[in-house]
Image (spheres, helix red, strand yellow):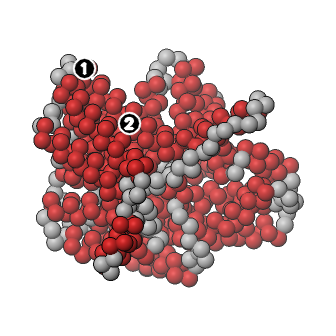
Amino acid sequence: MNYNNPTFWLLFAAVYAFYWRLRHRRQNDLLLVASYVFYGFWDYRFLFLILISTIIDFIGGLGVAGVELPKWRRLRLAALLIGSALVLCSNVRYAALAAGLVHLDAHAVLGALPERLRDFAVPLATAAVTLAYVAFLPWLYALPERARRKTFLTISMVANLAILGFFKYCDFFVGSFVNLLHALGVQVVDVRLLGILLPPGISFYTFQAMSYTVDVYRGDATPTDDLRDFALFVCFFPHLVAGPIMRASTLLPQVVHPRQRRPRDAEEGLLLVLLGLFKKIVIADNLAPMVNMIFFQYGRGGHLPTGPESLLGLYGFMFQVYGDFSGYSSVARGIAKWLGFDLIINFQTPYLSTTPSEHWRRWHISLSTWFRDYLYIPLGGSRGGMAVEYRNVIITMTLAGLWHGAAWTYVIWGAYTGVLLCISRALGTKEVRNVAGQRLRWLWRVLLTFHLTCSSYLFFRSSSVPAALHMGARILTDFTPTATAGTMLGLLLFYAGPLFALEAYTEGERHLERLFTAPWPRQAVAYAYCVLMLVIFPAVQTHEFIYFQF
């Protein structure tokens, strides 16, 4: 269920039709149900994973703060988790079960129920672990304060990272180990990949839930003892699967406290949704076929694009990935505005940066700051000298690359980005402002930073490391102009040019009021352009948001 899919808007319309008619408590309940419907639309079994993260960090946050849950609440949470495992993960074929019940067919009903003991493997394992943890909780509560806080924090982090690691990286590391054995001459290896299905957005909601416990531990957030409020904080559907990653100190108070309709929220929300859909449907989805055509040819061999075609394909991916990533965040912010929530600005014209560091402060801001606050700074940050700082930068960016995907191309992309940041810091590169007297210098630095960023995204997008290196070599050694390259350049300018002019005018989403307060003819042109492009030039084929795979 995507923002560019009518099914989502039917769900949102149903929610919105009742939302502002309800009291605060019922609003939250409605949003929670809608969020679970939204996420369960991909596969209802994924709901069990998000529920595990929710309960682990709910108990963890309270435990860190020294709030002991009564025994009856602990048992209710255990029953909820075990019951959810039975309902969601015991291989019940619900469609066949419903059909059997409708037709009063006992044979069909029995055939839809679990048949083997292994169908109950997940519920039985859940029951064992959950009941053991519940029995262990009184001992944890009785620990000295410092030990108790650290223990609850450790349990939260280990559990979340274990879930994320299993679903996202198990097959990657097993496959890499098998390849290593093959390289060492061991050809017969009886190891099979599990073929694990990656739940959409697991990295995002895991990071958000985990950061809650860390923030409570640091004293940056106040925990809530209401499970429903915390569950909504974790799975709030507008930003659930691709960000922005919200901190508890920012989003949780908006969940807990009543919300009011505010002047201009409707207008600002409409503009954000319109811009987000434009970036996704018009820019990202229309550039996707051109980008796929270029990168696919490097993956399969045979006839290769020329250097200019390859470079324009790389440019196309840069605009595609920006339209896709920032488009999701813009729509999320717009929908949240309509519901009375404020989500943070996630992209701030990153392609107008003048240093690699500035680029990462403007690109997927919620994710960049997450790695900064929860990985780079705990590693030591810039404390301890230049060598330690560079080590921490490279570790952080390499792990950020691995976070994006279980492939060596992502690892190299992250490490390469870390090296670029270190070189920039070693050279003492300073940011340049776009002001009178240094505009040419600003433009040169923008172009240089953009192309350095492009070079790293060769690895991000390519199917393999050799393909990325081959494409990079082609760009640097083949300068043959072609009609195809001219067409590709025209497509880039046609689809992406006007939007980036608008974003330069409003400084991304920081100063949208410049459009609201502009003369009505200027507003009319901007809105009409976006609407007409969405109507006349939608992509022939829609594509999932790229970040859904992360």
Q: Earlier in the sequence, mark 1 or mark 2?
A: 1
Q: How many numbered discs sit on the rendered protein?
A: 2
C-alpha distance separating marks 1 and 2: 20 Å
Image quadrant assignment for residue 30: bottom left
Q: Residues within 10 Å of mark 1 (few under 14, many from 20)?
A: few
Q: Residues within 10 Å of mark 2 (few under 14, many from 20)?
A: some
> What label sits on residue 146 in the rendered view?
1
Please name which of the two marks, 1 or 2, marks the residue nearer to the observer: 2
Residue 484 horizontal/vertical position (percent): 80, 69
Residue 312 visible = no
Q: Nearer the viewer, residue 149 or 172?
A: 172
- Quadrant where the N terminus sits is bottom left
Residue 89 horizontal/vertical position (percent): 38, 54
Residue found at x 74% / y 37%: 188
Residue found at x 56% / y 67%: 543
Which residue matches tag 2?
Answer: 159
Residue 24 horizontal/vertical position (percent): 15, 61
Using the image, determine if residue 377 lies above or below residue 119.
above
Q: Nearer the viewer, residue 430 or 449?
A: 449
Q: Is 435 positioned to the left or the right of 345 in the image?
A: right
Q: Quick one: SS at disc 2?
A: helix
Residue found at x 32% / y 53%: 86
Check disc 2 and give the amino acid type: Ala
Residue found at x 38% / y 72%: 108
Q: Is 88 positioned to the left or the right of 302 in the image?
A: left
Residue 403 visible = yes
Q: Nearer the viewer, residue 277 or 232?
A: 232
Q: Quick one: SS at disc 1?
A: helix
Residue 26 horizontal/vertical position (percent): 16, 63
Check disc 1 and give the amino acid type: Arg
